[in-house]
Image: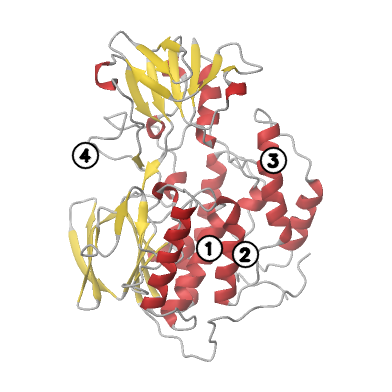
Amino acid sequence: MMTNPTIPKLNFSPILPLIPQNVAVIGAGAAGLVAARELRREDHKVVVFERENKVGGTWVYNPSTESDPLGLDPTRVVIHSSLYASLRTNLPREVMGFRDYPFVAKNGAQRDPRRFPGHVEVLEYLNNFETDFGLIELVRLGAEVRRARLEGGKWKIRSRMRVGEELDEVYDAVVVCNGHYTEPRIAEIPGIETWPGLQIHSHNYRSPEPFQGQVVILIGSSASAVDICRDIAGVAKEVHIASRSVTVGTIGKLPGHNNMWLHSMIESAHGDGIVVFRDGSAVCADVILHCTGYKYNFPFLDTNGIVTVDDNRVGPLYKHVFPPLLAPLLSFVGLPRKVVPFALCEIQSKWIAGVLSGRVLLPSSDEMMADVEAFYRTLDASGIPKHYTHYIGDSQFEYNDWLASECGYPPSEEWRKEMYSAAIKNMEVRPETYRDEWDDEDLVAQAHEDFKCFSKGNGNLSQ
């Protein structure tokens, strides 16, 4: 159980008067909802713009798919969510939840009590979060931000309602929470222009039935790739997985499956339907399914070139959140990848809200820019590609705890860190069954003991 942690106060000035701001939050997924809550806790006036007709962002399942299965046609009608029907979380609910709003199993006909629940349960959790914290009144549904531009120290926001009405408004600050699972990244394959088969990105994958009896090549090794290849293997003739991270000893048929093979990356595709892999093997395939990730995309944001997206690096950003030249008037929530997203978005939002009110202090623009440049040099020296800038993975709790220290908030619970590590290891050891078999009951008990330290709705740790 958490016991009276020491609260650091670096750059934390509680004696300063709070300065309420008029803030536009773009997106009402998990990031936008928790940002709205934290901003309102600091007495900011908040409007959340959500282009869809319900909150939840990527957790709102949509059985429809886009007209372009690769998601490259700029004229297509964009489907925001990338959920597939069978998706279950790849982290246990105790780890997933916001720190002061535990994601606990609830009784009810529509509830999913499993530790690794399906996507419907996650959306229910977010809906409960919105209701319990009274955020409904802050959200404008069906309101798409068409343009956000800084003019004269204020943000001019143009939004369009689904009925076609456009509205121009002025805000002091903008918090971008539009997610990053909508704009597909596609693998480059030599010869693909002559290959006659179907290409699809996982963004447009919903269920395995369309792949009945087909030979499918799946590119990728992420969590969604692992799920989808097993989903499809139940109906497809063959599934061939192409992965950059494969090792020589693992190439070949996967244990426990009679129709699934692992390969190195694709070398080339040909007009006769043959696809050749770098390991020398080749198959005649019907479908290439790109589970190759997504691009950061902010088509509404006009910063006059101050913030750019270069090979999936959004920058320059101080600590993945503030552009030094526009801080604190512009901020981003939820950019880091390979993380526990809800808790990360929560602590980023606390930091943003505190900075905007004047309670938490930022370094100077020059100091922030120097920090960003030093970070980029470290990545370069380590040989880390630019498109991995926002992958923080193993350092996520160090990052979260740094933000917590800036806000005067307790560091991450030790059980949360240990449970995350245990879940990742269990996934590697039991890729087929990790969601239903685990060995961390002691950590689960610690988590539920800690959950008793929270009073419903007030968001404060009991000290």
Residue position for label 4? 74
Can residue 460 be seen in the rendering of this structure? Answer: yes
Q: Name the residue under label 3.
A: 425
Q: Nearer the viewer, mark 2 or mark 4?
A: 4
Which residue appears at 51% of the width and 14% of the height? 235
Asked if the residue under mark 4 is in contact with the one under mark 3, i.e. CB atoms within 8 Å, the reply is no
Q: Above or below — where is 222 with respect to 136? A: above
Q: How far apart are marks 3 and 1 (CA)?
A: 25 Å
- Between the residue at mark 3 and the residue at mark 4, the CA separation in whole angstroms equals 40 Å
Q: How far apart are marks 3 and 2 (CA)?
A: 26 Å
| Disc 1 target residue | 346
Which image quarter holds the C terminus? bottom right
Nearer to us in this view, 73 or 362:
362
Query: Marks 2 and 4, Cα distance to the nearest angstrom?
Result: 40 Å
| Horizontal arrangement in the rendering, residue 87 relative to residue 27 (left or right) | right
Determine whether the residue tagged by mark 1 lies in a helix, strand or loop.
Answer: helix
- Identified by mark 2, the residue type is Asp
Tell me the kind of residue under disc 1: Glu
The answer to whether marks 2 and 1 mark residues whose Cβ atoms lie closer than 8 Å is: yes
